Image: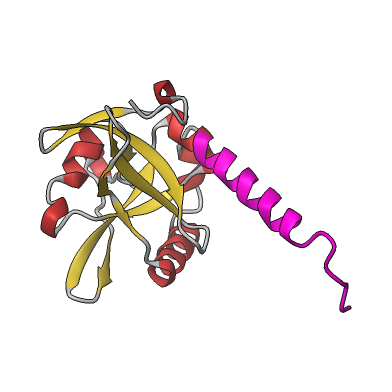
Amino acid sequence: MNLSKDNSIYPLVIYKGWQCLVRPVLYPDGNPGLVLEDIDDGSPVATCTVNLPIQMIKITEMLEEDFPLLLNDHDNSSNIQFVFIKDYSENEGMLRTLQEAGIVDHPIYGNYGVPNRIYASSGYIKQVPFQYICHNELIEEFGKLYEEQTLNLVESHIGEPDYA
Protein backbone atom coordinates (compact mmCIF):
# COMPACT_ATOMS: atom_id res chain seq x y z
CA MET A 1 0.00 0.00 0.00
CA ASN A 2 1.16 3.52 -0.76
CA LEU A 3 2.00 4.88 2.68
CA SER A 4 3.25 8.30 1.58
CA LYS A 5 -0.24 9.80 1.99
CA ASP A 6 -3.40 9.09 3.93
CA ASN A 7 -5.26 6.84 1.50
CA SER A 8 -8.49 6.74 3.51
CA ILE A 9 -9.69 10.05 2.09
CA TYR A 10 -9.47 8.98 -1.55
CA PRO A 11 -12.33 7.18 -3.26
CA LEU A 12 -11.84 3.63 -4.42
CA VAL A 13 -12.86 2.42 -7.90
CA ILE A 14 -12.39 -0.78 -9.80
CA TYR A 15 -11.18 0.01 -13.29
CA LYS A 16 -10.52 -2.81 -15.76
CA GLY A 17 -9.96 -5.22 -12.87
CA TRP A 18 -7.61 -2.93 -10.93
CA GLN A 19 -8.51 -1.68 -7.45
CA CYS A 20 -7.55 1.97 -7.62
CA LEU A 21 -7.50 5.10 -5.55
CA VAL A 22 -8.64 8.25 -7.34
CA ARG A 23 -6.22 11.07 -6.60
CA PRO A 24 -6.47 14.76 -7.49
CA VAL A 25 -3.58 16.39 -9.34
CA LEU A 26 -2.89 19.80 -10.81
CA TYR A 27 -1.55 20.27 -14.30
CA PRO A 28 1.35 22.75 -14.64
CA ASP A 29 -1.10 25.50 -15.66
CA GLY A 30 -3.16 24.91 -12.51
CA ASN A 31 -6.06 23.05 -14.13
CA PRO A 32 -7.39 20.13 -12.10
CA GLY A 33 -6.91 16.50 -13.09
CA LEU A 34 -7.51 13.01 -11.75
CA VAL A 35 -5.30 9.93 -11.73
CA LEU A 36 -5.82 6.31 -10.71
CA GLU A 37 -3.21 4.60 -8.53
CA ASP A 38 -3.02 0.93 -7.60
CA ILE A 39 -4.36 0.51 -4.06
CA ASP A 40 -1.59 -1.95 -3.11
CA ASP A 41 1.58 -0.19 -4.19
CA GLY A 42 0.54 3.27 -5.40
CA SER A 43 1.78 2.64 -8.93
CA PRO A 44 0.04 4.59 -11.70
CA VAL A 45 -2.82 2.79 -13.42
CA ALA A 46 -4.35 5.55 -15.57
CA THR A 47 -4.66 9.27 -16.04
CA CYS A 48 -8.40 9.96 -15.99
CA THR A 49 -8.33 13.45 -17.45
CA VAL A 50 -6.83 15.50 -20.25
CA ASN A 51 -5.75 19.11 -19.93
CA LEU A 52 -7.42 21.30 -22.55
CA PRO A 53 -6.81 24.83 -21.23
CA ILE A 54 -8.31 26.83 -24.11
CA GLN A 55 -11.42 24.64 -24.26
CA MET A 56 -11.72 24.89 -20.45
CA ILE A 57 -11.78 28.69 -20.63
CA LYS A 58 -14.29 28.75 -23.49
CA ILE A 59 -16.70 26.28 -21.86
CA THR A 60 -16.56 27.80 -18.38
CA GLU A 61 -17.13 31.28 -19.85
CA MET A 62 -20.10 29.94 -21.82
CA LEU A 63 -21.51 28.32 -18.68
CA GLU A 64 -21.12 31.54 -16.70
CA GLU A 65 -22.94 33.50 -19.41
CA ASP A 66 -25.67 31.02 -20.31
CA PHE A 67 -26.21 29.42 -16.90
CA PRO A 68 -25.33 32.05 -14.27
CA LEU A 69 -27.03 30.05 -11.51
CA LEU A 70 -25.09 26.88 -12.37
CA LEU A 71 -22.52 27.25 -9.63
CA ASN A 72 -25.23 27.97 -7.07
CA ASP A 73 -26.93 24.69 -7.93
CA HIS A 74 -23.97 22.59 -6.80
CA ASP A 75 -23.18 21.90 -3.15
CA ASN A 76 -19.62 23.17 -2.99
CA SER A 77 -20.03 26.04 -5.45
CA SER A 78 -17.00 28.05 -4.33
CA ASN A 79 -14.69 25.12 -5.05
CA ILE A 80 -16.30 23.63 -8.16
CA GLN A 81 -13.76 21.83 -10.33
CA PHE A 82 -14.34 21.06 -14.00
CA VAL A 83 -12.36 18.40 -15.87
CA PHE A 84 -12.20 16.75 -19.27
CA ILE A 85 -12.39 12.96 -18.95
CA LYS A 86 -10.16 10.81 -21.14
CA ASP A 87 -12.72 8.22 -22.22
CA TYR A 88 -11.10 6.94 -25.40
CA SER A 89 -8.33 4.60 -26.50
CA GLU A 90 -6.88 2.72 -23.52
CA ASN A 91 -9.15 4.74 -21.19
CA GLU A 92 -12.42 3.60 -22.73
CA GLY A 93 -14.97 3.22 -19.93
CA MET A 94 -13.33 5.81 -17.66
CA LEU A 95 -16.30 8.20 -17.73
CA ARG A 96 -18.76 5.51 -16.72
CA THR A 97 -16.47 4.24 -13.94
CA LEU A 98 -16.08 7.72 -12.44
CA GLN A 99 -19.77 8.59 -12.78
CA GLU A 100 -20.92 5.33 -11.19
CA ALA A 101 -18.54 5.92 -8.27
CA GLY A 102 -19.98 9.42 -7.70
CA ILE A 103 -16.73 11.17 -8.57
CA VAL A 104 -17.86 13.18 -11.60
CA ASP A 105 -21.19 14.23 -13.08
CA HIS A 106 -22.63 16.34 -15.87
CA PRO A 107 -22.52 20.05 -14.99
CA ILE A 108 -26.03 20.76 -16.32
CA TYR A 109 -29.28 18.82 -16.30
CA GLY A 110 -32.24 19.74 -18.48
CA ASN A 111 -35.90 18.85 -18.30
CA TYR A 112 -36.86 15.62 -16.57
CA GLY A 113 -33.33 15.14 -15.23
CA VAL A 114 -31.79 14.52 -18.64
CA PRO A 115 -28.13 15.62 -18.65
CA ASN A 116 -26.98 18.21 -21.16
CA ARG A 117 -23.77 16.63 -22.39
CA ILE A 118 -20.89 19.01 -23.03
CA TYR A 119 -17.87 17.99 -25.07
CA ALA A 120 -14.67 19.55 -26.32
CA SER A 121 -12.64 18.63 -29.36
CA SER A 122 -8.99 17.71 -29.03
CA GLY A 123 -7.13 17.04 -32.25
CA TYR A 124 -8.38 13.71 -33.55
CA ILE A 125 -10.78 13.21 -30.65
CA LYS A 126 -14.04 14.98 -31.42
CA GLN A 127 -15.84 14.41 -28.12
CA VAL A 128 -13.93 14.72 -24.86
CA PRO A 129 -16.54 14.77 -22.04
CA PHE A 130 -16.64 17.86 -19.83
CA GLN A 131 -17.62 17.00 -16.23
CA TYR A 132 -17.56 18.51 -12.78
CA ILE A 133 -16.04 16.78 -9.77
CA CYS A 134 -18.81 16.07 -7.26
CA HIS A 135 -16.91 14.02 -4.66
CA ASN A 136 -16.57 16.20 -1.52
CA GLU A 137 -13.27 14.76 -0.26
CA LEU A 138 -11.66 15.27 -3.68
CA ILE A 139 -12.95 18.84 -3.77
CA GLU A 140 -11.34 19.46 -0.37
CA GLU A 141 -8.07 17.90 -1.57
CA PHE A 142 -8.07 20.19 -4.61
CA GLY A 143 -8.37 23.13 -2.22
CA LYS A 144 -5.27 21.89 -0.38
CA LEU A 145 -3.38 21.42 -3.66
CA TYR A 146 -4.17 24.99 -4.69
CA GLU A 147 -3.03 26.28 -1.29
CA GLU A 148 0.24 24.32 -1.66
CA GLN A 149 0.74 25.64 -5.17
CA THR A 150 0.22 29.23 -3.97
CA LEU A 151 2.65 28.77 -1.06
CA ASN A 152 5.27 27.27 -3.36
CA LEU A 153 4.89 30.16 -5.77
CA VAL A 154 5.25 32.71 -2.96
CA GLU A 155 8.26 30.89 -1.46
CA SER A 156 9.94 30.68 -4.86
CA HIS A 157 9.84 34.48 -5.13
CA ILE A 158 11.13 35.29 -1.64
CA GLY A 159 14.47 37.04 -1.84
CA GLU A 160 14.18 37.95 -5.52
CA PRO A 161 14.80 41.59 -6.39
CA ASP A 162 11.80 43.83 -7.02
CA TYR A 163 12.08 45.18 -10.55
CA ALA A 164 9.08 47.54 -10.24
Residue 147 lies in magenta, yes or no? yes
Quarter in which the N terminus is drawn: top left
Report the front residue among 151 and 52: 151
Report the front residue among 112 and 13: 13
Residue 95: give x, y in percent of width and height. Answer: 21, 46
Residue interval drawn in magenta: 141-164
The residue under the point 28% across, 46% down is 110
Residue 97: give x, y in percent of width and height. Answer: 19, 38
The residue under the point 47% across, 29% down is 5
The residue under the point 17% across, 41% down is 96
Q: How many marks?
A: 0
User: In the picture provided, is 143 more to the left or to the right than 91?
Assistant: right
User: In the picture provided, is 135 more to the left or to the right than 64?
Assistant: left
Residue that lies at the very extreme toward the top in this rendered image = 8
Asked if residue 19 is positioned above or below residue 73 in the image, the reply reads above
Residue 22: give x, y in percent of width and height. Answer: 33, 36
Asked if residue 2 is positioned above or below residue 8 in the image, the reply reads below
Q: Main secondary structure of the magenta part?
A: helix
Quadrant assignment, res 124? bottom left
Residue 47: give x, y in percent of width and height. Answer: 28, 51
Asked if residue 134 is positioned above or below residue 150 in the image, the reply reads above
Report the front residue among 58 and 161: 161
User: In the picture provided, is 45 more to the left or to the right than 57?
Assistant: left
What's the coloring here? secondary structure
The residue under the point 48% across, 36% down is 139
Residue 156 lies in magenta, yes or no? yes
Quarter in which the C terminus is drawn: bottom right
